[in-house]
Image: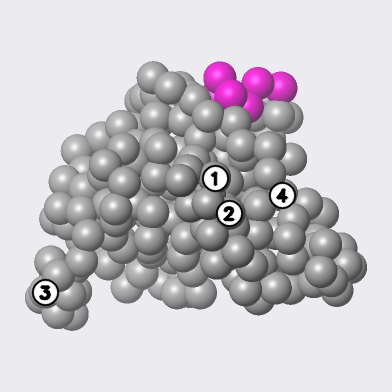
Amino acid sequence: NENELSALASRVKTIAFGMGIGLSPETEKALGNLINNYKGRLIIDADGLTALSRLGTDILKTASCESILTPHNMEFSRISGLPISEILSAPIDHAKAFAKEYKCTLLLKGPSTIVADGDRVYVVDRGCAGMATAGSGDVLSGILAATAAYIPSPLEATALAAYINGSAGEIAESKTNPISMTAGDTARAIAEVIGNILCNNR
């Protein structure tokens, strides 16, 4: 129901869209409605990125919201039309060019996380092998929904979320192991990372 979605969206600063939502015409319709009408920050991840590729990324150029996209290389290939080999050859350049053309903030997942807004780029080198597990991207999107609601710059909010997520993953791996750690282990380490950040800034 579009009216219900609009009413819910009007009450929040940030929406994370796509994780576990599934692929259907209703998903695409809901995403299109948010892009065209929502006034806050819209994080698009997972199934939301597939829905965006079906809607066409040009819709972002006239978005009413500030959009933040969080693809891995395959998802980035899908929304950009670039072959994965080309993305891997120059990921920073492609991330920056895409963000500039489509007026968004792009977080490109990989061995290092690239965060670009078309003008500036951050490379976040936190994380570990144990984070290559189901749900890790969902944890990142949850952290990003929180940072994006409070930090004025979407680029800086996104880079901070990537740093917190990667650092929490490193702590989780140190307390478990890279084979059996889960996304839940990363989530449980978030408070420790934030505590460390606060202590270091006192």
Residue 32 in view (yes/no): no
Is 187 left, or right, of 61 in this rendering?
Answer: right
Instruction: Locate the N terminus and report the quarter of the image it occupies.
Output: bottom left
Q: Which residue position is annotated with label 3?
A: 7
- Label 4: which residue? 127
Q: What residue type is labelled 1?
A: Asn
Left or right position of 170 against 104 = right
Write down the residue under mark 2. Answer: 196
Q: Horizontal and vertical percent for residue 200?
A: 54, 45
Relative vertical location of residue 186 with respect to residue 98 in this rendering, above or below: below
Between disc 3 and disc 1, the foreground one is 1
**Label 1–label 2 contact, CB within 8 A:** yes
Q: Is mark 4 on a helix, strand or loop?
A: loop
Q: What stretch is highlighted in magenta?
A: 89-95
Q: Is residue 76 above or below residue 28?
A: above
- Which circle marks residue 119 in the picture? none
Q: How crowded is mark 4: few (under 14 residues within 10 Å), some or many (20 or more)?
A: many
Residue 101, how many percent across, how many down?
Answer: 35, 25
Per the image, label 3 sits on a secondary structure element best described as helix
Q: In this view, does 152 lie above or below 166?
A: above
